[in-house]
Image (tube, helix red, strand yellow):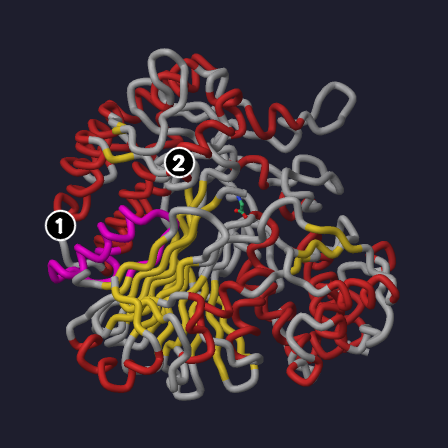
């Protein structure tokens, strides 16, 4: 890596970029996407780029690009590599959402590989005898696992939009699992933190801890032989290597031992669904993101629509006035989320009304510029508006890949909580999700992220739980992609992506500065503004005086992994909030 001061840049920028060097800027430059964010270490490439939460996995993707693969090949290889190197969120036993932009067709596709409720799931399965939600069962039991979608989703993307063989894209992950890799600080810390929970399950204890029960330390070699064998079955048999045969038998055996519901028929019946992205506009940009069963795209566009009615830039970034307007837009959107959102194959979701600019205008008019509303006085607003119109974990992980042809993948996938429900499939080497907690176990009760849901998101056999995952692509006025982003963070994902877009479009920040700027979050209930360190005490004092209940977030808000372009070259930005993330340019 080269540290380059601004004084050397004009002379060497062109040469270094053409050599595809990794540039770490120590000072600002006279370049529209670099100069404002120089101190935040963007990574530049004129070829392709991969940005993910874990450096080895980013390198796997970048190497696939260098070997002639496209952004989809790189995304699939990175996804399988993260299942080995980032076991808390990278996964085979979970699910997610992928947005693919195909440069030659100028078309964007949404791939839904969300987990599905098993056929024997039922609406009240997480209620105890008193009719209250049994959180232990919904979050940590084997019944908290939905039928995994990741393997089907990644292979669907490869089959339809990739150019390489399964064997070639799985090879790096198999090698990492069978030969092992050096544990970094992030993995070591995370395994230490989750020790008590994971060690309750014998397979998880054996897979993720040393024989004496201690956790792996930075620098230790971590080998996962059973996971390697599962990856090899997938490499040889495709989806059948996971959803049928030995892996499927091992999953069902684990279900029987632990009291879970997933059956061989559920696994064999799992389907990936290609959907139309939700797209909207903000000023002169187009924004495309994930449609239901993620709530991400709808509410991202809805909040941008509300905020477009205000002059945000003159308020100043992270000023009290700006945070107040953000908060009020978030409050309205999350109130709507609680009522209208669910799996669109089971419940009609009023997408067009929710992203209607006139509806957003009506919501914007309910915002008092000087005074906070109380969430108890804010209800899901669509019916009222339609009537008026007629009379009116969080431990998900995100990564982005971009190739030199301009194909883009922005992918968020998850086990839900860190390490899912903590139950590894004995003999198969991977952890299971606890995504069933994203259903609304009882209307009006909060899930693990404090999100309230209604009957639209009630548990039903084969249904997909509502998500907040928001893989997103932003296009400029000429319909050229300029930014790919997304984040983990459970309920906070949508508001994090919102702030990435506003930082970039409204406040003209470079991608690394947009990533690093302090974030806030509000989700209607609880009625509280969560904020990261870095919001000024002046802003906080003013927000309190407007009537906001404010609180420091106990966690950092998200971990975006983004790539932007100025049309000439790519700039990658790994979020500095969590250790281990890396933007790796092709050829590095
Ligand atoms: N499990 C978090 C989400 O899907 O939003």
* Local secondary structure at mark 2: helix
Q: Which quadrant holds residue 2?
A: bottom left
* Disc number placed over residue 187 in the picture, else none: 2
The residue positioned 29% from the left and 24% from the top of the image is: 428
Query: Would you name the residue on which mark 1 appears?
Result: 165
Indicate the position of residue 194 as horizontal and vertical percent values.
Answer: 50, 27
On the rendered structure, is 584 left or right of 531? left
The residue positioned 56% from the left and 85% from the top of the image is: 283
Examine the residues drawn in magenta and state their main secondary structure: helix
On the rendered structure, is 263 left or right of 383? left
Pick the quarter of the image with the N terminus: bottom left
On the rendered structure, is 211 left or right of 352? left
CB-based contact (under 8 Å), mark 2 and mark 1: no
Indicate the position of residue 226 as horizontal and vertical percent values.
Answer: 25, 23
On whether ligand 1 comes within 8 Å of the CB at mark 2, the answer is: no
Foreground residue, 515 or 173? 515
Can residue 445 be seen from the camera position used here? yes
**Number of numbered discs on residues:** 2
Indicate the position of residue 452 as horizontal and vertical percent values.
Answer: 71, 46
What is the CA distance from the residue labelled 2 to the residue labelled 1? 30 Å
Based on the picture, tell me whether residue 58 belongs to the magenta stretch.
Answer: yes
Indicate the position of residue 40 as horizontal and vertical percent values.
Answer: 44, 66
The residue positioned 35% from the left and 66% from the top of the image is: 572
| Rendered view: 355 above or below 76 | below
Foreground residue, 26 or 416? 26
What stretch of residues is rendered in magenta?
Answer: 50-74
* Disc number placed over residue 470 in the picture, else none: none
Q: Nearer the viewer, mark 2 or mark 1?
A: 2
Q: Dot 2, crowdedness within 10 Å: few (<14), some or many (≥20)?
A: many
Pick the quarter of the image with the C terminus: bottom left
């Amino acid at each position: 890596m080269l540290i380059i001061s601004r004084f050397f840049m004009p002379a060497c920028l062109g040469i270094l970029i053409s050599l595809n060097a990794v540039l770490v800027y120590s000072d600002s430059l006279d370049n529209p996407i670099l100069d404002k964010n120089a101190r935040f270490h963007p990574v530049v490439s004129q070829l392709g780029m991969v940005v993910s939460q874990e450096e080895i996995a980013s390198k796997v993707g970048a190497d696939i690009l260098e070997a002639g693969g496209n952004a989809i090949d790189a995304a699939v290889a990175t996804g399988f590599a993260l299942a080995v190197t980032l076991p808390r969120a990278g996964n085979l036993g979970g699910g997610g959402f992928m947005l693919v932009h195909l440069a030659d067709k100028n078309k964007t596709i949404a791939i839904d590989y969300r987990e599905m409720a098993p056929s024997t799931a039922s609406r009240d399965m997480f209620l105890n005898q008193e009719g209250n939600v049994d959180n232990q069962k919904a979050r940590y039991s084997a019944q908290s696992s939905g039928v995994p979608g990741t393997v089907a989703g990644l292979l669907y993307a490869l089959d339809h939009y990739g150019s390489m063989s399964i064997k070639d894209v799985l090879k790096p992950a198999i090698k990492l699992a069978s030969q092992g890799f050096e544990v970094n600080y992030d993995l070591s810390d995370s395994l230490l933190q989750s020790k008590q929970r994971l060690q309750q399950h014998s397979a998880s204890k054996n897979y993720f801890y040393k024989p004496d029960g201690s956790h792996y330390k930075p620098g230790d070699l971590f080998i996962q032989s059973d996971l390697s064998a599962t990856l090899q079955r997938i490499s040889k048999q495709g989806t059948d290597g996971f959803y049928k045969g030995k892996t499927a038998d091992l999953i069902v055996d684990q279900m029987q031992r632990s009291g879970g519901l997933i059956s061989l028929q559920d696994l064999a019946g799992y389907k990936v669904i290609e959907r139309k992205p939700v797209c909207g506009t903000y000023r002169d940009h187009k924004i495309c993101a994930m449609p239901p069963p993620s709530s991400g795209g709808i509410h991202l566009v809805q909040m941008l629509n509300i905020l477009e009615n205000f002059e945000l830039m003159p308020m100043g970034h992270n000023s009290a006035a700006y945070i107040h307007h953000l908060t009020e837009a978030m409050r309205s959107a999350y109130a709507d989320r609680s009522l209208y959102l669910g799996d669109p194959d089971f419940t009609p979701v009023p997408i067009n009304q929710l992203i209607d600019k006139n509806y957003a205008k009506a919501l914007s008019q309910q915002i008092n510029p000087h005074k906070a509303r109380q969430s108890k006085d804010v209800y899901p607003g669509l019916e009222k508006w339609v009537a008026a119109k007629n009379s009116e974990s969080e431990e998900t992980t995100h990564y982005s890949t971009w190739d030199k042809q301009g194909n883009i993948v922005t992918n968020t996938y998850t086990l839900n909580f860190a390490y899912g429900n903590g139950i590894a499939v004995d003999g198969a080497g991977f952890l299971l999700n606890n995504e069933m907690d994203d259903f609304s176990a009882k209307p009006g009760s909060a899930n693990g992220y404090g999100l309230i849901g209604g009957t639209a998101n009630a548990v039903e056999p084969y249904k997909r739980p509502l998500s907040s995952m928001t893989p997103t692509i932003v296009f400029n006025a000429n319909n050229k992609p300029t930014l790919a982003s997304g984040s983990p963070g459970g309920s906070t994902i949508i508001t994090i992506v919102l702030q990435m877009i506003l930082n970039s479009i409204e406040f003209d920040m470079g991608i690394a500065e947009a990533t690093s700027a302090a974030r806030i979050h509000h989700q209607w209930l609880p009625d509280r503004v969560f904020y990261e360190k870095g919001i000024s005490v002046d802003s906080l004092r003013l927000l309190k005086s407007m009537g906001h209940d404010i609180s420091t977030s106990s966690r950092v808000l998200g971990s975006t992994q983004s790539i932007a372009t100025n049309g000439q070259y790519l700039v990658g930005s790994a979020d500095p909030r969590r250790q281990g993330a890396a933007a790796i340019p092709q050829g590095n």
